[in-house]
Image (cartoon, grey):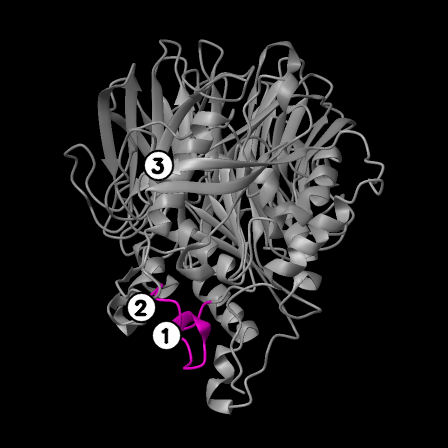
Amino acid sequence: MPVTRWGGGVGALAALALVLLLAVPGEARVQPSRTGTVTARSAPSQALGESIAYNVYLPYGYDTGAQRYPVLYLLHGRGDTMQAWTRVKDTLDEMIRTRRIPPLIAVLPDAPWSERGSWYVDSRYTGADLPGRPVETALTRDLVGHVDATYRTAAIREARLVGGYSMGGAGALRYALAHQDLFSGAVVLSPAVYTPLPPSDSSTRDYGAFGRGGEKFADEVYRELGYPSLLPKLDPDLPVRLFVAVGDDEYANPDPADAHHDLDFESAALYNAARRSPTVSAQLRVLDGGHDWTVWAPAFEQAMAELGPGLSTTPAVGLPAPLLGTSATDWAGGVAAHADGSLTTGFAAGGPVDGQPHAGRLDAVLTRTSGGTTRWTRQLGTAADERLYGVAALPDGGVLAAGYTKGDLDGRHPGNTTDDAFVARLDADGAVRWITQFGAPAAADRLYGLAAAPDGGAYVAGYTKGALDGPNSGDKDALVARLTPGGELSWVRQYGGAGEDKAYGVATDGTNLYVTGSATASLPGTAALGGLDGWLAAYDQDGTRRWATTVGGTADDRLNAVAVTTSGLAVVTGSSGGDLRAAAYTSKGEQSWTATVATPAADEGAAVAPLPGGEVLIAGYTRGRVGVTAGGADVLTVRLDGRGKQRASAQLGTARDDAVDPFAEPNLYATTTASGQVAITGLTYGTPAGGDSLGNGDVFLATITPTTGLPPTAPQP
């Protein structure tokens, strides 16, 4: 007899027998405490002209509270019923009880249409034997609407997941991709999906789901509804999370020509196609077992452990509009807060900004804003690249900016083609007072950190591949320099070992100068910890190094920023082994406290903003979940008290990467404003709330309330 390919589950009779067995009088099991309930209900459907039967799982405490819950929709396989998914009730109870996932509602719809082979789509088949029904419309509109109206749900995509196995896995995949407005992710188990078309013996062809008129299966319809046609059309501002799982003992077609249609092959093909979409984050698991619950039960638990914690009944906090930049490539370059409440934001722009002439490639741009109004914009550039890596306010309302140029930015370096450090001073009206460019001939020199000196001069930090203060010790040496209020170089110091050494941050309290960065080998006065090390060094105002220490562990560590608190501690931040790390040091180099923020994904601190009482707000990025995930890498804010204890944390962002560049390095700056808030600027590849993306990477500017770590207009926790 011919072999029928998988398109369903283990059968309705087996599932029904299990339910009946559990319901035998006198055989009731002792239920653990804090368990949810499963009840049969029905929902009216205008699309079908009949009711949709479903089971609903309500978590423990639903009847006694008032909170709102996320919803998980679970689709059964071909030939099965809404009873099939009831077997995961104990898994949900346990995962909720142990806080592996938030309390949620699960809806298990019955899909009897086209004799249980609907594939969860709107069928166009008109044959009398298996009349097509608008199943997709009924479930995604009528059922979802009914659930939101009947139960205490949150009617936002962040609060919905859809899952399924076999035919239901195909349905869950389609719903997550075709209805991004409804679902944020999908549990896709042994999905009955085939590319480009199902083989001739697949049950996908037998039930009219992909038919048209009197034809039960039409190639064009299947291609139209399949995931290969959906992936290129996804809205990048609505990220989708997929968890795909399959058994390693799936049916193996004896015909080698059809081997690529075995569901383990197809699942891998789905995963590899999905992970290449900028909108989708995908996971793939191959488990021991076949096309049955020996795979689906453990895979469901793994999937919920991955996707469940991301469910939220409140939407993510977005970045404010408008963005700064151009339709070309742009990079964040710093922010300074002035006594009158205005802000100066620095960035590198790949085109003209506010009518300023574009010199070529990347230009350095400074713009002064107040209350949402632009006071002035100044664009500095050459035919080559200029990047900004720091902006600092001056007492007279002026501003300092630092970075590097590959051209002749100050008019005194004709023919320059290598990276040179530069510092510029502008007055309160945006007029350029001076530009100082310096570096070793024919060698790369860059500035990554800037601090204003008490007299109106500047302290800068970065690296040189040349010899600015004696011979270079290795590949790159960290550099520290002092400029006078008139722009003259007062002194330059190199600090390096045998490897690659860079300085990223610099700060001063008027007496002590602190510099921080990274090193690949031991630096003078320190011991190497292993991998890339973070370091902090203290200097006198004349450039004499007093002490230095390495920070981190045996994994890769980097310190990106330093600031001096109101209590006189030097607080550094960066990453240690993939986690955000912050530490405080006295002026004598004694460590006062350390703090870590760790998620299963990458977290890194990029800026330190001092707050009253010795507190700080650390700003950086996370690819994990600290608050409500927006998507990709999000901006991360963490408020620490004077002893390093965490008082608040939050995340905000767009659907794409924010605050980090394509090289996995943070591109974000922060400063404390005159009103006690914190201004943060950084790179974003996404679309801001209520605004538009300019394209190819733009710059955001946000004001953060330290007590919550979120913008004042965001819903406060």
Which residue is the site of mark 2? 223
The one nearer the camera, 494 or 507, is 507
Q: Is residue 573 left or right of residue 435?
A: right
User: Which of the two discs, 3 and 1, sits closer to the camera?
Assistant: 1
How far from the left and from the top, in percent, is residue 100? 70, 39
Disc 1 residue type? Pro
User: Which of the two discs, 3 and 2, sits closer to the camera?
Assistant: 2
Which residue is the site of mark 3? 699
**Residue at 40% in and 48% down:** 420
Q: Is residue 333 left or right of residue 79?
A: left
In the structure shown, which secondary structural element does the residue marked by tag 1 occupy?
loop
**What is the crowding at mark 2: few (fewer than 14 residues within 10 Å), some, or many (at least 20)?**
some
**What is the crowding at mark 3: few (fewer than 14 residues within 10 Å), some, or many (at least 20)?**
many
Q: Is residue 284 left or right of residue 209?
A: right
Disc 3 residue type? Val
**Residue at 59% in and 55% down:** 472
Whether residue 218 appears in magenta in the rendering, the answer is: no
Res. 553 visible in picture: no
Residue 4 numbered mark, or none: none
Which residue is the site of mark 1? 196
Quadrant for the C terminus, please.
top right
Q: Main secondary structure of the magenta part?
A: loop
- Residue 114 against residue 157 in the figure, above or below: below
Disc 2 residue type? Arg
Between discs 3 and 1, the one toward the N terminus? 1
In the structure shown, which secondary structural element does the residue marked by tag 2 occupy?
helix
Which region is colored magenta?
A: 193-210
The one nearer the camera, 210 or 694, is 210
In the structure shown, which secondary structural element does the residue marked by tag 3 occupy?
strand
**Residue at 14% in and 34% down:** 355
